[in-house]
Amino acid sequence: VAIRTACVRGLYKSRRPDAVPLLVSALNDENAEVRNSAAMFLGWLEAKSAVVPLLQAAKDPDKRVRKSAILSLTNRRDEVSVLPLMRLLDDEDAEIREKIVAALERITGEKVKFDIQDGNRAGNIEKLKEWWMNRKSELIAGSTPELSVEPDELIGGKTDEPKGGEKHRGKSKGAPNQ
């Protein structure tokens, strides 16, 4: 195990382009420490080809591997990971859900209020995904129209946002609030 972990570290330090596929394959190692190191180093290398394997690693049975994969995806800031990360908000571990919310905020540049303790996670995840799809459509269309409903109507809860909402970075009202 120590030798495989050292090899993973050496691959990272080499900074060679051919190290990325080897680190990706290390995400499937039988040992969680090796998988954890691979997930962490892939994030530091910021390899675009590692996004999908890191999303898979974010579902690893080992919590440390999941946390490293989520942190690596956060560092990549690749919007392709937003919807898959939202789906992972149903993780049984509250700390993992908290890391995912932080990742989503960093990647999207929007405040994401998601009650990690709420028992209706599945319904809230669907509404959050709907918000993101609408937001992406706005960005693609080059416009940012006001929401036709208030964020509290989307989730069914109250928000701290004043009526009419404030725009984040002048683009939108932000993610639906809990």
Image (cartoon, grey):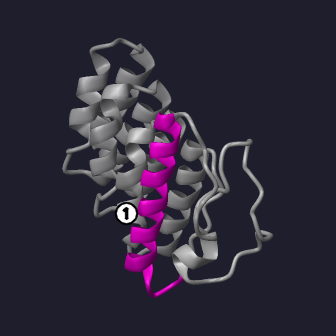
Q: Is residue 68 left or right of residue 164?
A: left
- Please identify the dominant SS of the magenta region: helix
> Percent from the top left, x then y, of residue 126?
39, 69
Badge 1 crowding class, 10 Å Cα cut-off, few under 14, some 14 to 19, many 20 or more, is some
Res 142 quadrant in image: top right
Which of 97 and 169 lies nearest the eye of the viewer?
169
Q: Is residue 165 above or below residue 91?
A: above
Q: Position of residue 106 (x, y in %)?
A: 60, 46
Residue to which mark 1 is pinned: 88
Q: Quadrant of the N terminus?
A: top left
> Is 171 in front, or is 160?
171
x 77%, y 57%: residue: 166
18 and 31: which is toward the camera: 18
Residue 162 versus residue 8 in the image, above or below: below
Q: Which residues are magenta?
A: 116-141
Does the magenta portion include 40? Answer: no
